[in-house]
Image (tube, helix red, strand yellow):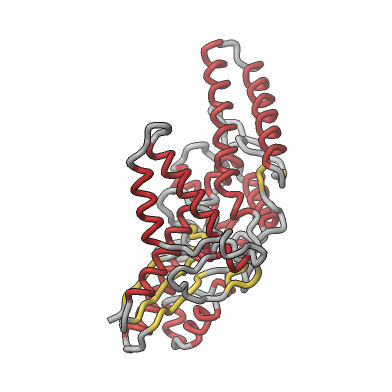
Amino acid sequence: MTAVAMSVAYVNGQRQGRILEKPFGMGDTIKRETSPEFSAKATPILDIESEIRLAFSWAKTSWDAPPVQKMKDLGLERAKIHGWQDSYVFTKAMGEMVINCMRGDIPVVTIRPSIIESTYSEPFPGWMEGSRMMDPVVLQYGKGQLTGFLADPNAVLDVVPADMVVSAMVAAMAKHGSTSNPGMHIYQITSSVVNPLVIQDLAKLIFQHFSAFPCMDAKGRPIAVSPIKFFDDANEFSAYVSTDAVRRNERLAAAISNEKISRSLKSFCLRSVEQAKYLAKIYKPYTFYGGRFDNTNTRELMVEMSEEERRSFGFDVGSIDWEHYISDVHVPGLRRHVMKGRGRSTEPQLGAIP
């Protein structure tokens, strides 16, 4: 019997450089690894039972803040104390620790994909349900609502198509399910080492796509886009999106004499500013990320497969043509399956999307 655990590559927290496929031990703390200048007293050992008790105690005392927001704030605070970006990857790491501690003689396959986006080929190119991590930014940009973002243009955004993640998972299950070799077997389904997608290259591809196939406004006019501006300071970005929203609102209001519609447009612009700030805040740990995820185990798994198996269960992220995937597969799929025709475009029925 083999157990399979679904994790995420960013469970590695604030580790930098080349990050290997290695399991967590109970009590591991990223802060102690990455900040040797911190003393043992300044960086406590991660005690999962204590973290659970703390969360329960905070949940019972919610008089000074809404319970949901209070728990979010607590999770972020505890994650950063121990060296993780947010509560999502922090709790994923604790989950891996618990599984590794309790597995006994049962082989455990832990799958760590990075940012999962639309399918590369199966069941058909560009399929997805709902927007994933980078998609709200792409959609707002294409609709002319976001012209800049808080990101390092030279950083790498680690992206993998959903069908490659599934194929790698099936292959890992087949390998370890036929053996009785106990252990914690880590597979990082990632692209940042073997086929990095640089953020400024991604932005260029998105600009080229929406320039060639623009979204349409409510009157059927094409929405023009310009190359995205990058910011490394949150305050500068906040000031920029606020100023940009005011300008857009003034242009729209000047073309409309109806006061009620003008008020609605102003309200919409204000909401778009808050949305942009929110996205920048939660994505900042990933748009300035300095780690690269090694996927040696995953590549060796593919080497062990027969030629027929490799054709049937292809998950070679090194073979991804990013220009084709972003321009001809992912963004058209995003517009078809997530926008569902909203913000119509001049885009033809591309061959990659049946």
- Residue depicted at 40% across the width and 62% down the height: 48
Which quadrant: the N terminus? Answer: bottom left
Quadrant for residue 191, please give it. Answer: bottom right
For residue 19, side relative to residue 308 (left or right): right
Residue 184 lies, with reference to residue 214, above or below; the image says below
Confirm whether residue 238 shows in the render: yes
Q: Is residue 150 above or below residue 350?
A: above
Name the spot of residue 349 as percent of width and height, x first.
51, 51
Q: Give the answer, above or below, for where 97 lies relative to 352.
A: below
How many labels sit on residues? 0
Find residue 88 and report its image quarter. bottom left
As drawn, is 210 to the left or to the right of 264? right
Residue 237 location (% of width, % of height): 69, 39
Q: Quadrant of the C terminus?
A: bottom left
Depth order, front residue of 233/254 = 233
Q: Position of residue 60 (x, y in %)?
A: 32, 41
Which residue, as the protein is rendered here, is positioned at the far left? 1
Observer-nearest residue: 319 or 156?
A: 156
Q: Is residue 332 left or right of residue 309?
A: right
Observer able to see residue 333: no
Compared across the picture, whether 329 is left or right of 254 comes to left
Whether residue 279 is situated above or below residue 305 in the rendered picture: above
Residue 138 picture location, percent across and down: 57, 46
